[in-house]
Image: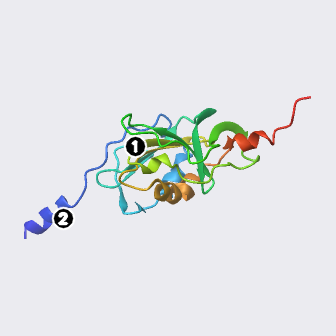
Amino acid sequence: MLAVPALALSACSAPVTVQPAPGAANPACAPLMLALPDSLGDASLRKTTSQATAAWGDPAAVVLRCGVASPGPTTDRCVSVNGVDWVIKETNAGAPDAGPSSSSPSTASSVPSASAPSAASSPPAAATDGGTFTLTTFGREPATELLLDSGRISSATVLASLSAAVSKVPATKHCVGQEDLAKLPANG
């Protein structure tokens, strides 16, 4: 009879230790956190040790932190998935950079959300080569950060599955691409 409780305890995962973001106490994180899915693909949601954080998988394949600083204008690759713009950075130096998925990638720039939508519409191509990536929402305050092990879970699955929850924090800016520059008024 003692073996049953021991078996039940051994199936439980320990909480994932996650450092909270500086703005984890921002009230705008609450609706996002309440809307998170119970799973991302085959990875189940796990308990974490800090406010406004989440993790999926055992070991964790995806870690989310709400309340990070919003990225400013950058030339880093930016993709839009279901209306959510993500700035992408490879975080493990050993993995090769697969580069952008098109010849004119979008970049993050301060374009009000009422303007043209993001030119990018596909998940990050490089986030499928088994590397570890940091993805940060662009144009949302507070921003949300993901640490993603693309060797264990598809970036397309993760970003599509999290879009509804992340959309709880309204967008005020969007990524733009080279094709958006042609839409700017000429000086003169």
Mark 1 — residue?
A: 132
| Residue at point 62%, 53% (across, down) | 121
Q: Distance between the residues labelled 1 and 2?
A: 32 Å
Picture quadrant where residue 7 is located: bottom left
Q: State which tag comes first along the sequence, 1 or 2.
A: 2
Q: From what the image shows, is residue 110 above or below residue 59?
A: above
Tell us which disc is closer to us: 1 or 2. 1
- Residue placed at 72% from the left, 40% from the top? 111
For this rendering, which residue is in front, 163 or 1? 163
Mark 1 lies on a secondary structure that is strand
Q: In which quarter of the image is the C terminus?
A: top right
Q: Where is residue 137 in the image (x, y as percent from the top left)?
A: 56, 44
Of the residues shown, which amino acid type is indicated by label 1? Thr
Crowding at dot 2, Cα within 10 Å, few <14 / some 14-19 / many 20+, comes out as few
Q: Name the residue under label 2.
A: 8
Amino acid on which disc 2 is placed: Ala
Comparing 82 with 52, the one in front is 82
Place of residue 115 in the rendered image (x, y in percent of width and height, measured from the top left): 76, 46
Contact check, label 1 and label 2, Cβ < 8 Å: no
- Counting from the top left corner in percent of width and height, residue 62 is at 40, 50
In depth, the one of 48 and 99 nearer the eye is 99
